[in-house]
Image (cartoon, grey):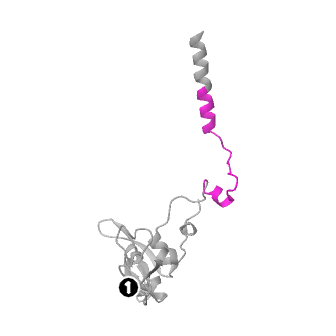
Amino acid sequence: MRGQTTIILVITLVGVSLSGCSSSERVVVRGQSQETADRGNPKWIGMPNPAAVYCKALGYKHEIVTDDKGNQYGICNFPDGNVCMAWNFYRGKCGHEWSYCKQHGYDLKELGRWEGWFRGGVCIDKTTKKEIGTVFDLMGMDLSKSLPER
């Protein structure tokens, strides 16, 4: 009798546990916006390359190239015919005259590989030499607008 009760109890607990995992209803927390709730079921997958978004947002052509070893990387093509590796341009390592900072009258501080991996270069006020902000923040880059629909 005791063994039978234990088995029934275990089956009941497993059933309750599994039913909690299979709910197809979306719960919206009180005070949560619909936009925030929709993040749980996005229309897109992944994250776009911030360097490519930066290049395109400034009106330049971004393309993926393949070297003779099969490695692929993005380049940003400027109106004067010069090109720059997209991540280097985003971090402020090349193409200074085409950067967001130069277009808005600021100096440009380049960031290292790990420091600027997401935020890009930093705009510096020419007079005070103080940091104004990163190109990512100053441009109001919204990576979600660059994603393909599912």
Measured as percent of width and height from the top left, residue 62 is found at: 45, 76
Q: Nearer the viewer, residue 52 or 110?
A: 110
Quadrant position of residue 128: bottom left
Q: Nearer the viewer, residue 69 or 138?
A: 138
In the rendered image, the vertical position of residue 127 relative to residue 10, given as above or below: below
Measured as percent of width and height from the top left, residue 94 is found at: 36, 81
Q: Was residue 130 drawn as part of the magenta stretch in this picture?
A: no
Q: Residue furthest top?
A: 1
Residue drawn at x 59%, y 13% is 4
Q: Secondary structure at mark 1?
A: loop
Quadrant containing the N terminus is top right
Residues drawn in magenta: 13-40
Measured as percent of width and height from the top left, residue 20 is found at: 63, 37
Quadrant containing the C terminus is bottom right
Q: Residue furthest right?
A: 30
Quadrant position of residue 32: bottom right
- Name the residue beneath numbered marker 1: 82
Residue drawn at x 65%, y 61% is 35
Neighbour class for label 1 at 10 Å: few (<14), some, many (≥20)?
Answer: few
Total marks placed:
1
Q: Nearer the viewer, residue 80 or 122?
A: 122
What residue type is disc 1 on? Asn
Relative to 6, 80 lies left or right: left
Residue drawn at x 50%, y 62% is 47
Q: Residue furthest front?
A: 128
Q: Was residue 39 drawn as part of the magenta stretch in this picture?
A: yes
Q: Residue furthest left?
A: 69
Residue drawn at x 62%, y 39% is 22
Relative to 45, 89 lies left or right: left
